[in-house]
Image (spheres, helix red, strand yellow):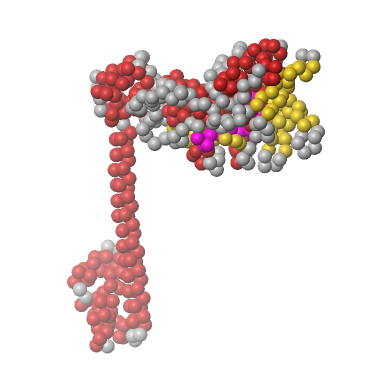
């Protein structure tokens, strides 16, 4: 599908080395194989027994995934979103911060979903589901920093904050990883994954197998597992299936992985080996030169204007949205979208929202009473900022002037007091009489009026000013 021409938060290709998979999440399924949660199913349990690589002792591992209402258990689509969030975190901050910012539009684009209201809603549900679902690992979470199996329980996301109708991309999305998961990212218990290849697989079982086998192929190009354990505990197939049914369910996924160049094709006699009554072993061989075939590229349509996606996301038919965007100024449409979002947050919202939005743009409705466009708010805020800045500058000038005046008064008083101390009583009386009768007329008038009105402090300042003037005038003759 077409990509936005605006700068993206994500890499140019979904198959870039920035995509990552957390290896605990790849070991046991953390979601259903389906896109719908069966009625009454609120918990998934997966378990196995392995040999500790250092001691050789058996290690019993178990994972419980709980999905409380109203969101329920994670689904196969939620796993796709999880991998997308890992790719986004790698691209944004290389796992240096647990918090990432994006938009619903960017997430939908990253995952290759259609840009419409349904996908936006699905993104919100997926994110809230990862915040609500509880993963309880019993001796099954590998702490790569402490090099030990751990009992841990956590929600994958600690914070999910989704803005509504802010800007053209449908609001910012703020996410924060849980500290247990993020510690594993930081400890490098992650591996590269070809996200584009993963997303292009048709079968949910093929996707699950690809993640699990891709994790384990690092130690050998040939992997052999107990068929039941692989199917029930690693892929998530129903435990009610008999071996023949398990093989039947796995066959389309294996064929897809073989045809796409991930697995070496094997006949059934080589793929499966009987290990006892009702027990089978299954063999996987990695393709000698593993270059997974990309989906045949089709000419990409020209990028669709972002405003079309914004209108479609609010219920306007895509053809109608394209017509509006082609015929109306972009800024006028953006303002009407903003006004529409504002109205939808009020009690008196339109009865037919998408129809109202289309008509408000097509017929150029007046903006709703009480609504102020963000551009106007920004201009008003800038004007207020400038006004406050000017007031602050003026206040600072007044403060500095007052400080200078006080310093001048203090310096003058000190000089006059020192001069008066040097005079005899008779000389001082004669000097003060001359200063207070022969000084500048304006200063004498201020001194007289301040004294008459009982303004003692101001009168004293005027007096010292007159004394200083007389002192400076007479000092050369002294």
The N terminus sits in image quarter? top left
Measured as percent of width and height from the top left, residue 205 is found at: 60, 19
Q: Residue furthest left?
A: 441
Can residue 155 be seen here? The reply is no
Measured as percent of width and height from the top left, residue 164 is found at: 42, 27
Query: Quadrant of residue 60 in the image?
Result: top right
Let me know if residue 252 is in the magenta part.
no
Query: What residue is drawn where x is 36% and y is 76%?
Result: 414
Q: Nearer the viewer, residue 386 or 48?
A: 48
Query: Quadrant of residue 7 in the image?
Result: top left
Q: Nearer the viewer, residue 249 or 121?
A: 249
- How many numbered discs? 0
Q: Nearer the viewer, residue 201 or 10?
A: 201
Query: What residue is drawn where x is 31% and y is 62%?
Result: 401
Question: In the picture provided, is 76 more to the left or to the right than 63?
Answer: left
Question: In the picture provided, is 219 more to the left or to the right than 378?
Answer: right
Measured as percent of width and height from the top left, residue 467 is found at: 28, 76
Q: Which residues are magenta?
A: 16-31
Measured as percent of width and height from the top left, residue 161 is found at: 49, 31
Q: Is residue 469 above or below residue 213?
A: below
Can residue 428 be seen here? The reply is yes
The C terminus sits in image quarter? bottom left
Query: What residue is drawn where x is 28% and y is 21%?
Result: 324
Let me know if residue 27 is in the magenta part.
yes
Q: Nearer the viewer, residue 202 or 102?
A: 202
Query: What residue is drawn where x is 25% and y is 86%?
Result: 476
Question: In the picture provided, is 379 more to the left or to the right than 189?
Answer: left
Query: Quadrant of residue 226 in the image?
Result: top right
């Amino acid at each position: 599908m077409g990509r936005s021409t605006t700068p993206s938060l994500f890499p140019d290709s979904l198959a870039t080395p920035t995509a990552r998979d957390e290896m605990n999440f790849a070991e046991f399924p953390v979601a259903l194989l389906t896109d719908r949660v069966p009625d009454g199913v609120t918990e998934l349990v997966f378990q196995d027994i392995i040999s500790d690589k250092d001691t050789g002792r058996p290690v019993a591992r178990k994972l419980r995934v709980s999905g409380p209402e109203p969101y329920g258990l994670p689904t196969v689509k939620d796993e796709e979103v999880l991998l997308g969030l890992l790719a986004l975190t790698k691209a944004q901050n290389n796992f240096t911060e647990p918090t990432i910012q994006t938009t619903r539009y960017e997430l939908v684009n990253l995952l290759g979903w259609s840009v419409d209201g349904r996908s936006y809603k699905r993104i919100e549900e997926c994110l809230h589901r990862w915040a609500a679902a509880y993963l309880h690992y019993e001796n099954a979470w590998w702490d790569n920093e402490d090099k030990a199996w751990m009992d841990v329980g956590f929600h994958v996301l600690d914070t999910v904050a989704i803005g509504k109708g802010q800007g053209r991309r449908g609001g910012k999305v703020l996410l924060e990883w849980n500290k247990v998961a993020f510690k594993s990212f930081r400890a490098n218990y992650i591996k590269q994954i070809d996200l584009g290849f993963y997303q292009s697989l048709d079968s949910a079982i093929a996707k699950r197998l690809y993640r699990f086998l891709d994790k384990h192929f690092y130690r050998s190009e040939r992997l052999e597992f107990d068929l039941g354990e692989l199917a029930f505990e690693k892929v998530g197939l129903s435990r009610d299936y008999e071996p023949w049914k398990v093989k039947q369910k796995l066959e389309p996924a294996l064929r897809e992985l073989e045809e796409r160049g991930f697995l070496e094709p094997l006949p059934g006699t080589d793929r499966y080996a009987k290990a006892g009554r009702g027990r089978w072993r299954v063999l996987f061989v990695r393709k000698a030169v593993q270059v997974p075939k990309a989906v045949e590229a089709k000419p990409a349509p020209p990028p669709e204007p972002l405003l079309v996606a914004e209108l479609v996301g609010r219920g306007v038919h895509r053809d109608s949205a394209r017509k509006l965007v082609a015929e109306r100024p972009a800024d006028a449409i953006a303002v009407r979208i903003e006004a529409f979002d504002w109205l939808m947050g009020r009690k008196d919202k339109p009865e037919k929202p998408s129809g109202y939005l289309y008509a408000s743009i097509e017929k150029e409705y007046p903006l709703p009473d009480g609504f102020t466009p963000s551009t106007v708010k920004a201009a008003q805020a800038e004007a207020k900022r400038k006004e406050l800045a000017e007031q602050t500058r003026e206040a600072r000038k007044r403060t500095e002037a007052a400080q200078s005046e006080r310093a001048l008064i203090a310096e003058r008083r000190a000089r006059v007091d020192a001069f008066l101390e040097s005079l005899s009583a008779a000389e001082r009386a004669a000097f003060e009489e001359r200063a207070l009768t022969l000084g500048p007329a304006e200063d004498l008038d201020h001194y007289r009026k301040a004294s008459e009105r009982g303004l003692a402090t101001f009168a004293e300042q005027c007096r010292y000013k007159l004394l200083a003037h007389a002192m400076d005038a007479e000092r050369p003759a002294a």
